[in-house]
Amino acid sequence: MPPSSLLFLGFFVLAGELIAGQHRSNGVQTMMEEDEIFGLFEVLGALLEDPGWAESHPQPCTETPWPGIQCEIGEDPPIFHVTKIHIGPDIASPPCKPSANLSESLLKLPFLKTLTIFNCFGTSPVTLSPSVFGGVSSLEHLALVSNPALSGKIPRTLSKIASLRVLSLAQNNLLGEIPREITGLVNLEQLDLSYNKLSGEIPVEIGGLNGLTILDVSCNGIEGNMPSSLGQLSMLQKLDLSSNRFTGAIPPDLGKLNRLVLLDLSNNFINGPIPETLSGLEHLEYLIVDHNPINSGIPLFIGTLGKLKSLSLSGCGLTGPILNSISSLENLTALALDNNSLNGTIPPNLGALPNLDQLNLSHNQLSGQLRLPEDFIHRLGNRLDIRGNVGLCRSNQIYKNSIPTYLETPVCGPINGKTSADERPDDYERSTKPPRHHDKMISSASWVVKSSFQPFSNLVSAVCFLIFSL
Ligand SMILES: *[C@@H]1O[C@H](CO)[C@@H](O)[C@H](O)[C@H]1NC(C)=O
Ligand SMILES: *[C@@H]1O[C@H](CO)[C@@H](O)[C@H](O)[C@H]1NC(C)=O
Ligand SMILES: *[C@@H]1O[C@H](CO)[C@@H](O)[C@H](O)[C@H]1NC(C)=O
Ligand SMILES: *[C@@H]1O[C@H](CO)[C@@H](O)[C@H](O)[C@H]1NC(C)=O
Ligand SMILES: *[C@@H]1O[C@H](CO)[C@@H](O)[C@H](O)[C@H]1NC(C)=O
């Protein structure tokens, strides 16, 4: 029954359909409509392991509440309606039975605003029925997350739920394309389709979702160019397109997203150069582009992104120098430029960045004498990695106390700073090199540290991998 029809039927007409469970609280007569409560019993019965749930919770809105359910009193008549169903390990254990599915009886809950189901569908296959997900038109918040058995396509009918503000279908096994129709959900604020097996392209019409603050389609198989229309999402704070198959250049219009805090494009096939318009991302704190064939220089504007905390451009085929302007990013905590073809020297001012706590410049073509301050080197320890730069050398005078493992560079030749690694005393280098197994141990420990410091890049790729290997 559509919500409005309740208003047209009188209270006394309805009374015949009301079941027991009436009671008075604060002088308001409160009861429930029979169809709605049986609908709830059927929905929960199709999900939960407990076959006696309905008997033990005959009045789930009043006398026998359950933490996963919320109700609100309607206005006319003043009776209770189910407005929220939440299922997850925090509510029930085990949350769901092996044969759990989504009952059509969801359609009997015309006041349902929130439906969140986490870690539930694990064994028998469940799909999103077009009739159900076109029909629960009161929904504002739909989150079906971490359900390995939730597969099939995203139904086009979702676009009929015009009130939807949050749509999260992350960490399932959904297939097919992102339906063009969902770009009509103009009230959408958060769209998270990450960690599925979605394919096809991002619909150009996505630009119409101009209330979006979060768009996350990471860890799918989405291909094609990033549409320029993404630049119309002027409220966007988080844009995560990582670990897909995007190709082509970064659309210059992305630079219009002046509220963006996180931009993650890592693990795609995106070409450079990174457009200068991205200097407009004045609130950007995380710029993660690792593992893309950018194949150009570090963008000249980088020093203007003063809020940057994490800049990650590993494995991007970067060439040319490490721009000195990076040293003006006083909020930088993590800088990863490893596995590129950067040449020239390491700007010593990087060591003056007060918050920098991770610096990976390994596997480049950097050269010259290392002039990072000693206190910086000790502060970072093994979170400073400059291995694999054959032209680098360090002075014999400093860094004597303890040389972090990843600082293994030859000592420069006799004339301070002017000589290259070619003149290094090789035997000294060998004697300071730790044994292989020690190297490995430190490497895995630093991985843990790095992950916890960089939740948006390395950890994400690790999780991505974990999910696909389930
Ligand atoms: C859902 O599960 C119920 C029992 O748990 C079963 O009767 C019903 O056929 C199932 N529906 C679908 C669509 O699998
Ligand atoms: C660093 O961040 C703080 C807090 O967000 C901000 O006030 C400051 O302007 C930032 N630094 C630069 C160089 O923009
Ligand atoms: C370095 O980057 C290349 C692509 O540029 C990639 O194939 C390789 O796996 C990366 N190596 C490491 C250690 O990340
Ligand atoms: C630096 O990056 C390389 C890959 O290019 C990686 O193998 C190494 O573990 C990283 N170092 C640290 C300290 O994270
Ligand atoms: C860095 O490499 C470029 C070519 O990619 C070359 O033109 C330039 O001279 C190199 N600079 C240094 C300092 O080696």
Image (cartoon, helix red, strand yellow):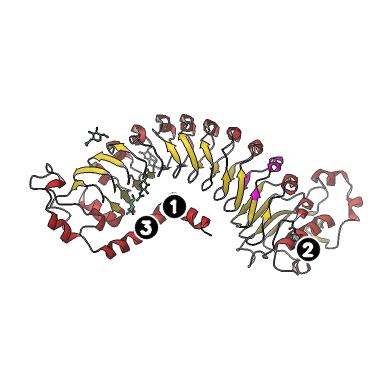
For residue 455, the mark is 1
Rendered location of residue 260, percent (x, y): 48, 38
Residue at 74 percent of width and 67 percent of height: 53
Residue at 52 percent of width and 36 percent of height: 224
Rendered location of residue 437, percent (x, y): 28, 65
As helix, strand or loop, the secondary structure at mark 1 comes to loop
Residue type, numbered disc 3: Trp
Ligand 5 found in image quarter: top left
Image: 122 above or below 300: below
Q: Earlier in the sequence, mark 2 or mark 1?
A: 2
Q: Residue furthest left?
A: 414
Q: To which residue does mark 2 refer?
A: 59
Rendered location of residue 307, percent (x, y): 39, 40
Number of residues whose C-alpha sits closer than 10 Å to that of mark 3, classed few (under 14), some (14–19) or many (20 or more)? some
As helix, strand or loop, the secondary structure at mark 2 comes to loop
Q: Earlier in the sequence, mark 3 or mark 1?
A: 3
Q: Please state the extent of the stretch shown in magenta in the rendering.
A: 152-170
Callout 2 touching callout 1 (CB < 8 Å): no
Q: To which residue does mark 3 refer?
A: 447
Residue type, numbered disc 2: Gln
Marks 3 and 1: which is nearer the front? 3
Q: Quadrant of residue 125?
A: bottom right
